[in-house]
Amino acid sequence: GQNLKPVRVDLSGRFSFVLLRAADANGVHKLLVRGQQGCTHDQLLQNAQREAKMEATTQRVPPARLAIIATGLMHWTSDTVNVSGARVVRGVDSAVRSNADAARLAGALTSCALPPLRRVTVEGHRMQ
């Protein structure tokens, strides 16, 4: 799972997202964000699982195990995407303790992956 892109989200519109934990056969963990218009949380997970299987085939390793840590919404307005409504899936990752933690984490990961001049807000507040 180490070669999976950390973030794959649409660059316009309003859509659901998932914050995922990917674990490889050695127990190495990586966080991923996936979001796409018209997809449910389960569909986003299934798409990421297909992506992990393709990567594993290419690398000739077992596929990463994926689990949803949190879900939420992203909404683009002009050059800014707002992360909102995050909900933690309890019992998946004890390091993500609150809905606010999940939203900030998804926002921070997304911010790092965006093209220049694109910004992220979390619940309407700029990322620090």
Image (spheres, rainbow, N blue to C red):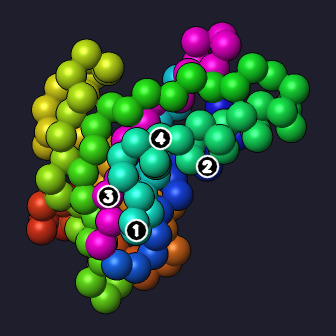
C-alpha separation, residue under disc 2 versus residue under disc 4: 14 Å
Magenta-colored segment: predominant secondary structure = strand
Could you tell me which secondary element the residue under label 3 belongs to? Answer: strand
Q: Using residue 123 as the reference point, say whether residue 90 is left or right of it.
A: right
Amino acid of disc 1: Gln
As for residue 25 lying within the magenta part, the answer is yes
Q: Earlier in the sequence, mark 3 or mark 1?
A: 3
Magenta residue span: 14-28
Q: Are dots 2 and 4 in contact, CB under 8 Å?
A: no
Give how far apart the Cα atoms at labels 2 and 1 are: 18 Å
Q: Residue at x 15, y 53 (%)?
A: 85
Secondary element type, mark 2: loop
Query: Label 1 belongs to which residue?
Result: 37
- Residue positioned 17% across, 58% down in the render: 84
Q: Which residue is mark 4?
A: 45
Q: Label 2: how many residues lie within 10 Å, few (<14), some (14-19) or many (20+)?
A: some
